[in-house]
Image (cartoon, rainbow, N blue to C red):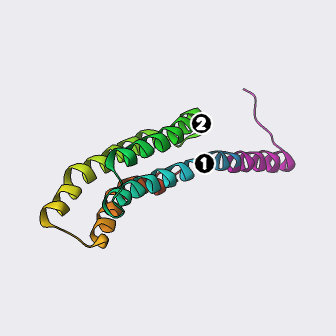
Amino acid sequence: MAENHFTYDDAVSRVSTSQEAGARALRAVRWFRWFVALQTVFALAFTLSIDVFGAPYWTAFALLLLASASVWATAYRHSLSAPRHGLRNTGIAVATWFALYTLMLDPALQLVGASSPWWWVLAGAVAASPIAACLWASSRR
């Protein structure tokens, strides 16, 4: 059986190569944080545009759909460098945001007659929090 003998210089070279590869891998995944942050901003902008600024629902929805589709298309193009289960978890978070806001928080605030814009901002932030939570979960190694 052959034994492995490494010189000190060879070992240092191999360790530095692995550290460089790890740094390149972290740089390759950096786009995913921007993707999650943009999706969170889009969700919050959608909720605020409808309930605080009074934009028509279908116009705001069409703009959200267009913006999200362009961001998701870019994400799928780079899906090989995405964190493990990152796109799946973000998709689940977006679906959770949509259901939470449109089926629970928006009707509840309309039912109690919340007129202050701060209630709607709080509801939008709470509803968008599952998307924002993907930001930190995706940074795990």
- In magenta, the rendered stretch is 1-23
Where is residue 91 shown, x and y percent of the image?
Answer: 40, 41
The tag on residue 78 is 2
The reply, left or right, for residue 68 in relation to residue 4 is left
Q: Is residue 111 above or below residue 57?
A: below
Q: Main secondary structure of the magenta part?
A: helix
Count of all numbered marks drawn on residues in the image: 2
The tag on residue 5 is none
Which residue in the structure is indicated by mark 1? 31
- The amino acid type, in three-letter code, at marker 2 is His
Q: Marks 1/2: CA distance? A: 9 Å
Q: Are marks 1 and 2 in contact (CB under 8 Å)?
A: yes
Q: 23 and 120: which one is in front?
A: 120
At 48% from the left and 55% from the top, the residue drawn is 135
At mark 1, the secondary structure is: helix
Q: 12 and 97: which one is in front?
A: 97
At 34% from the left and 44% from the top, the residue drawn is 58
Is residue 111 a member of the stretch shown in magenta? no
Q: Quadrant of residue 125?
A: bottom left
Can residue 133 be seen in this snapshot? Answer: no
Where is residue 140 shown, x and y percent of the image?
Answer: 51, 52
Is residue 12 a member of the stretch shown in magenta? yes
Can residue 115 be seen in this snapshot? Answer: yes
Q: 54 and 130: which one is in front?
A: 54
Where is residue 132 shown, x and y percent of the image?
Answer: 42, 57
Dot 2: few (<14), some (14–19), or many (≥20) neighbours within 10 Å? Answer: some
Q: Is residue 113 above or below residue 100?
A: below
- Earlier sequence position, callout 1 versus callout 2: 1
- The amino acid type, in three-letter code, at marker 1 is Trp
Where is residue 62 shown, x and y percent of the image?
Answer: 41, 42
At 25% from the left and 50% from the top, the residue drawn is 102
Q: 130 and 72: which one is in front?
A: 72
